Amino acid sequence: MKIEISEVFLKEKDKNSKMSIELDEPKKVIEILEEMGIENLGYANFYLNDVKVDKNTTVKNQDKLIVLPIVGGG
Amino acid sequence: MSYGYSGKILKVNLTTGKIGSQNLSEENMRKYMGGKGLVYYYLKDRVDKNTDPYSEKNPLYFMTGLASGIPTGGTSRMVMGTKSPITGGFGISESGGFVAAELKKAGWDGIIVEGKSEKPVYLLIKDDEVEIRDASHLWGKGNGEVNDIIKEENKDKGLKLSQIGQAGENQVQYACVMNDLKHACGRNGMGAVMGSKNLKAVAIKGTKGINFKDKDKITEISKWYAKYQKDKPLSKGLYLYGTAAGVESLDKSGMLPTRNFRDGSFEKAKEISGQTMANTILTQRGACFACPVRCKRVVEVNKEDIKVDPKFGGPEYETIGAMGSMCGIGNLDVIAKANEMCNDFGLDTISTGVSISFAMECYEKGIIDKEYTGGVELNFGNEEALLKLIKDISEKKGLGKVLSQGVKKSAEIFGGESEVFAMHVKGQELPMHEPRGKIGVGLGYSVSPTGADHMQAAHDTMITEEGPMLDSVKMLGLKKPADPMAYGKDKADFYALMEKWWGFLNMVGMCDFIPAPRGSMPIDKFIELINASTGWDVTPEECMEVGERGITAARKLNYDLGIDEVYEELPKRLYQPLENGGLEGVSMDKDKFLEMKHYYYQHFGWDEKGYPKEETLDKLGL
């Protein structure tokens, strides 16, 4: 599956925001990201194949997940 | 002795040339905390239903707040106020930058400008020395040039300036006041009122400093916050991508206002995002007074066919939405140019962009033709037409003359079905937030005393689940997250609580992007800062009460000026479905919306028509 994570959630040393990973089995958005060590997910919006989803949505290998900062005026 | 504020307001009468000061008591400062609250306090006895906003009877205010000038970040806000020529009611507009802090360092908590000068003038304030100076040589010039001239003729590059461009001189209804070229008191027509007074600029130098009660505590919190905020997502997003950080998120959610709110998704959203800006035209991340977050953008374009001067900063999200997706324009260079022109002419980028977008839709629908547009093919996406119309609006020329009056009056002139998609409330154009995906924001647009305004309350897309965002505001009494698509009593209560908090921030002079929930500073830490500055014992409950007082006071004044619930109607388009994007087919439910609005009235102790009940006014000391 393809993942694109906003730089907002990346630490300086691992700034590569686009990556592909292989899932052995479908997993929840939150599980995938926590396994990758991504923090502060309470401030994120998740988009699966360009549709907004919540953190408990199941992701499969052919999916594309995008993690962007929460929005709220400005 | 007062701490954190001087207790002195500068008073200038442009008709008589008299310059004086008046005292501000501790009782009133504690009751209103500054900013929006002080505008109400001074304005309420000065205008009535019959006061022409452009007459010498309408005062113009520049107010700071208790937080303004504390060297911590977010403490930069200045609130301007007047009877708005756009809404005919209580008018305010906030800005960051450096002017508020400089004014406080000069020993003033605010400025009251009365009357009207016979000839163009500017005000020069150097601590206690205040002069009204001739500005005949500056009239007709843009903000960039005037900024240079005033600094040069006073031999002081450190002067901080609030000023109007040609749009303010010409009383374009939505002319703004620019602070140091990059920060706008954009809304409610402050620039038009300043222009009506023949006041070209206010130049300020402050050397006295601010008397804080506990300087060591302020230094401690400031140092702590500068370090603390660095890796916090809310601050980091603003630092990296500015206020346009959310363009892609909004687009994917179907909430990016596009082609005059007809669509919710823009095919070129990525090209105009904060991320793209950071990778292309961004040259610097700027800041307001003492702010470590640095959300301001500085951009430069130096191409053969288009040049953008970095001295005008760079486009905020609102500008990107209004000039970009709303006008169907996916070229960041052009949007940056539009931003530069608006900052130089002194035009509110939101109202300007929405007015042009409205005209584009009218043209595409055949409501106006080439005779109206001066031969221009005014389709969505016409970059040349956008830039031409910005100039024409500032000069009130051709179609620009019609659009300079905003979409409400333009629709009356154009006729046909244009009223359906004239996107305004109380005559003020909608900001770049889609109420069909954020019902709470729709409520805010409707009930805001100043017309459609997105900065009255935290948006309902921010706190949608249990977690750190909700935790950050629990001490304000918010216990449950909000479903952005929900109506009903819970949503009304959510909005009201968040409005009280942001209302307080607009009174105290604090940027909404620093304290929670929109910013990374915990609320208790921010209140600790206010107490270190003043020596007071302010609590979260008192903050909420002050915010509530400001909201009810503005409402009372508006009703007294004849701006009542009849003026709370949302644009008809919001009750029609979005035509594309993640919310395609979604519209607002009018019956549910009106029911929610009445729950909102009840929350504040207002009657069924939205007027504050007697006991509510008594409780709040109004």
Image: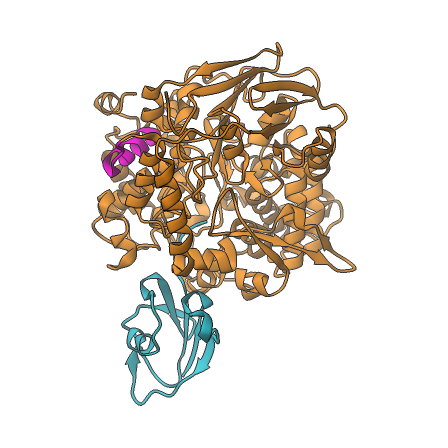
Chain colours: A cyan, B orange
Q: Picture coordinates of residue B380 (x, y %)?
A: 62, 56
> Can you say whether B516 is above or below B92 in the image?
below
Tell me the quarter of the picture where residue B185 sits: top right
Using the rendered image of the protein, determine whether residue B263 is visible from the camera's viewpoint: no
Which residue shows up at 60% across the image and 24% down it?
A: B125
Q: Picture coordinates of residue B610 (x, y %)?
A: 30, 30
Q: Is residue B544 left or right of residue B140?
A: left
Which residue shows up at 55% across the image and 30% down it?
A: B190
Look at the magenta stretch and give its main secondary structure: helix
Q: The C terminus of chain B lies in which quarter of the figure?
A: top left
> Can you say whether A33 is above or below B99 in the image?
below
Q: Picture coordinates of residue B387 (x, y %)?
A: 69, 49
The foreground one among B192 and B399 is B192
Q: Picture coordinates of residue B510 (x, y %)?
A: 41, 39
> Can you say whether B138 is above or below A61 in the image?
above
Count numbered badges in the picture.
0
Which residue shows up at 31% across the image and 78% down it?
A: A35
> Can you say whether B433 is above or below B3 in the image?
below
**Magenta region:** B537-551
In the image, residue B32 lies in the stretch drawn in magenta: no
Q: Is residue B352 left or right of residue B530?
A: right
In the image, residue B547 lies in the stretch drawn in magenta: yes
Using the rendered image of the protein, determine whether residue B610 is visible from the camera's viewpoint: yes
The foreground one among B190 and B540 is B540
